[in-house]
């Protein structure tokens, strides 16, 4: 199983950082790898909350909160995805340091394909995932500091056309075995492409206004689950 941990200092109070992290359905606002996201549970915060993240090019992640300590940490687990993760956990932990906040992101994951998956992880996927976590933290810092300062929050311009994606056309499919898989690319391409797209979006990004009220919120839909 692979693991990584990175941290970043954000120049604002911990409570402001927590407001952003705990708004689960709004991760698309600061994670450039996510085209759009929304809650798939009745609750948007707390233990047991779930969300759907569309990454573009037919890729998606569905996550569930498995640990929640108010104003301190939260942990999500991938429960369904088009990427070749057998399992994956992501934890955010925040702590106040004087007038700043230190955010630590740590992840433990295991890829599919046994030995081939471990080779891909060592050569390609692991480094790509580490870059994605670094970009994710940088996006969080930028979003919180700009918002707290009353300024416009920059969102990569490369995502402008993708924001209007029709989610009805990107629903995941179940394989005969019941697991959800993507329809494009091999193992390395399937996991790296959406993560690399997020990093490229940050490099090509520039400030623009957030979408208007009609576009800033993903479609109001809920997907039922079995008991």
Image (cartoon, rainbow, N blue to C red):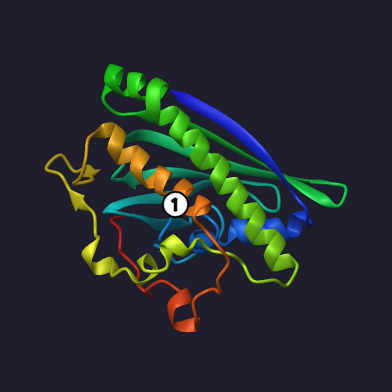
* Label 1 SS: loop
Q: Position of residue 119 (x, y in %)?
A: 34, 18
Determine the residue positioned at 15% across, 44% down. Answer: 175
Determine the residue positioned at 88% across, 47% down. Answer: 98
Determine the residue positioned at 76% across, 54% down. Answer: 14
Q: Nearer the viewer, residue 17 or 177?
A: 17
Residue identified by numbered label 1: 33
Q: Position of residue 69 (x, y in %)?
A: 65, 48
Give the quadrant of the N terminus.
Answer: top left
Residue 44 lies left or right of residue 224; in this view the side is right
Query: How many numbered discs sit on the rendered protein?
Result: 1
Q: Nearer the viewer, residue 218 or 163?
A: 163
Tell me if residue 66 comes above or below residue 4 in the rendering: below
Residue 32 lies left or right of residue 110; in this view the side is right
Tell me if residue 126 comes above or below residue 51 in the rendering: above
Q: Is residue 54 among the parts visible in the rendering?
A: yes
């Amino acid at each position: 199983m692979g693991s990584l941990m990175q941290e970043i200092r954000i120049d604002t109070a911990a409570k402001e950082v927590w407001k952003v992290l705990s708004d689960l359905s709004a991760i698309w606002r600061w994670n450039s790898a996510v085209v759009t996201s929304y809650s798939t549970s009745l609750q948007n915060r707390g233990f047991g909350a779930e969300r759907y993240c569309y990454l573009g090019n037919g890729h998606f992640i569905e996550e569930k909160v498995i640990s929640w300590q108010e104003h301190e940490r939260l942990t999500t687990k991938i429960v369904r995805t088009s990427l070749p993760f057998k399992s994956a956990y992501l934890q955010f932990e925040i702590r106040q340091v004087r007038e700043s906040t230190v955010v630590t992101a740590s992840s433990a994951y295991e890829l599919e394909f046994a030995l081939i998956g471990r080779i891909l992880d060592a050569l390609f996927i692991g480094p790509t995932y580490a870059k994605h976590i670094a970009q994710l933290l940088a996006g969080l810092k930028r979003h919180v500091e700009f918002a707290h300062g009353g300024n416009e929050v920059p969102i990569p311009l490369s995502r402008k056309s993708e924001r209007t994606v029709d989610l009805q056309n990107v629903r995941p499919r179940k394989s005969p075995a019941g697991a959800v898989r993507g329809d494009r690319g091999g193992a390395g391409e399937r996991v790296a492409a959406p993560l690399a797209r997020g990093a490229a979006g940050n490099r090509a990004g520039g400030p623009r206004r957030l979408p208007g009220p009609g576009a800033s919120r993903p479609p109001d839909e809920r997907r039922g689950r079995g008991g």
